[in-house]
Image (cartoon, helix red, strand yellow):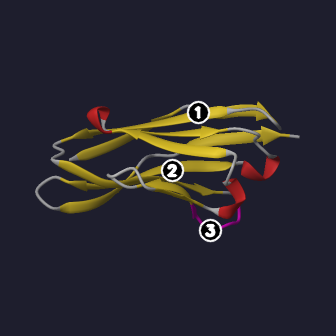
Amino acid sequence: QVQLVESGGGLVQAGGSLRLSCAASGSIFGIDHMGWYRQAPGKQRELVARVTSGGDTNYVDAVKGRFTISRDNAKNTVYLQMNSLKPEDTAVYYCNAKVYTSYWGNYWGQGTQVTVSS
């Protein structure tokens, strides 16, 4: 069984910064991509940023230049550094990872709330 545990969400004023962390644990033999999604009230969940096992990254246009995704393979952890936050970044942020145990599976964290006040 694999668990993704997120931390780092909270309330911040516009222009501020937050850093999200997500640690994967369990019977893990490998991790392919890791990423962050977000879901605002009344909206569909969307991909925010993703990083491959080789370190290649991609971002949704709305966060380019403000957010940075990174990972520590030794710790099975992915981070999302969020700078210059805007009220429209307010959402529940979910960690996602493709993990190999005895097969490849797609796993989600429980979500962490990010609220940006104007």
Label 1: few (<14), some (14–19) or many (≥20) C-alpha neighbours in 10 Å? some
Q: Position of residue 110 (x, y in %)?
A: 46, 46
What secondary structure is marked by label 3?
loop
> Which numbered marker is on residue 19?
1
Q: Position of residue 87 (x, y in %)?
A: 81, 47
Q: Nearer the viewer, residue 57 or 19?
A: 57
> Which numbered marker is on residue 44?
3
Identify the magenta region.
Answer: 41-47
In the displayed structure image, the side of residue 91 where residue 56 appears, left or right: left
In the displayed structure, 61 sits above or below 28; it is: below
Instruction: Name the residue carrying label 2.
Output: 94
Q: In the image, what residue occupies the spot 73% across and 40% down?
A: 115
> Which numbered marker is on residue 68?
none
Q: Quadrant of the C terminus?
A: top right
In the displayed structure, 61 sits above or below 2; it is: below
Q: Position of residue 13 (x, y in %)?
A: 82, 33
First in sequence, mark 1 or 2: give its number.
Answer: 1
Q: Amino acid at mark 3?
A: Gln
Q: Nearer the viewer, mark 3 or mark 1?
A: 1
* Magenta-colored stretch includes residue 100: no
